[in-house]
Image (tube, helix red, strand yellow):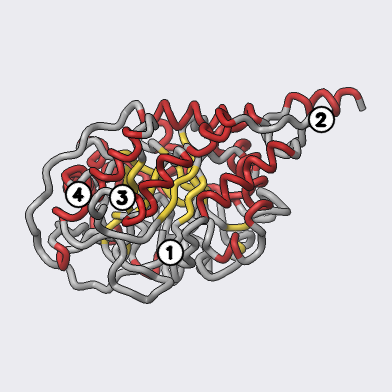
Amino acid sequence: MLAGLLACLLCLGGCALLRPEPPTPELKRLAGQMLLVGFRGAEPGPGTPDELPILGQIAALNLGGVILFDRDVALKSPDRNIESPEQVSRLTSALQAAAAKAGSPPLFIAVDQEGGRVQRLRSARGFAETPPAADLCPGGDPAPALAAGEQAGRTLAEVGLNLDFAPVADVNVNPENPVIGGIGRSFSSDPRQVAACAGAFARGLQSRGVLTAAKHFPGHGSSRTDSHLGFTDVTATWTEAELFPFAELTRQGLADMVMTAHVFDARLDPDHPATLSQAVIDGILRERLGFTGVVVTDDLQMRAVAGRYGLKESVRLIVNAGADILLIGNNLDFDPHIAEKTLDALMTLVAEGKVSPERIRQSFGRIQNLKAKLTPPRTPAAAQKSNKEPPCTSCS
């Protein structure tokens, strides 16, 4: 009994504190760095936060980062944050200026630029496009993946984007998978080839000063359903082989972040999908694979999470599971106050003793260590060649 009590007291993740403590303003600022959110708007305007509310939220909440989209899913609109290289440069400059003016660390400014169906920077808007992963190294030669990663990194860096939610490290176990194999997002059905090609793409991004996020841990390639739409159970299909690419990317230092999947495997955790699972994040990713960097969730508005958990409950489980950044695309649904609501939920959990201040400080430390690697943006790129394949507007 005493041993169990001591273990709970030492636990940084899953146990409630015996003596809740009120969150301090300093702790709230640290926690703000754990939020990476989407927003509406493409131009910073004439200098007032009202013209682009995210600028005021960056300062008020000490946000850790933002994500840009080319389309607004909730509005079914082709316009969101991305119009042209020149416009994106103005936007990212204004975002970073807002953080600097508030005395905050530099922002992660992220985008999904995997290639093929999932890329937000397209030739129709003046950007160089990225080929789909499935086409990059079918013969096993990683050189085309390296070149594609370098080009993608150059394209992002030139307009002030410093984080690519790529490469996809999912193994193409199920070629008909509606969200991975079926739309060309996996490099191969061979885990070793995935590791080599995803690693090459990541190396290309890093060579241009762009941070990487290997996804979707512990593997989404065997799923039969789409976690954007609802509960996704891989208990009967997932295998240990799907861990291999993540293990290799971790070993080689090619995953600046690892993004979790909202997939459920009863053999790994009988109660929660991976994003909300301490057994998966702390147990497998950190302890078994040795990953010490930043863990970012997949979009928390995806129905596999949002359709089954309330905001406060999902935040409690995710933070205690060991994730460092809560990604809220704010695009599948839109709430202009979602960042504030999420931060308030986290602070309430601290006050109730359900999340420890030390757990927040731990994530803050990992985030700041990674932000120390950020490099300045470059000059906008010229328009490049066209790719007419229809995009996957909600994929992440």
- Marks 4 and 1 sit apart, C-alpha to C-alpha, by 21 Å
Q: Nearer the viewer, residue 198 or 48?
A: 48
Q: Which residue is mark 1?
A: 331
Relative placement, left or right, of 290 versus 236 is left
Foreground mark, 4 or 2, reads 4
Residue 334, placed above or below residue 144:
below
Q: Position of residue 151 (x, y in %)?
A: 17, 48
Q: Secondary structure at mark 4?
A: helix
Residue 87 can be seen, yes or no: yes
- Which quadrant does the C terminus fall into? bottom left
Seen in the picture, residue 267 relative to 106 is either above or below; the reply is below
- Secondary structure beneath disc 2? loop
Q: Which mark is residue 18?
A: 2
Crowding near the residue tagged with mark 4, few <14, some 14–19, many ≥20 C-alpha atoms within 10 Å: some
Q: Nearer the viewer, mark 4 or mark 1?
A: 4
Residue denoted by label 4? 90
Which of the 4 image quadrants contains residue 356?
top right
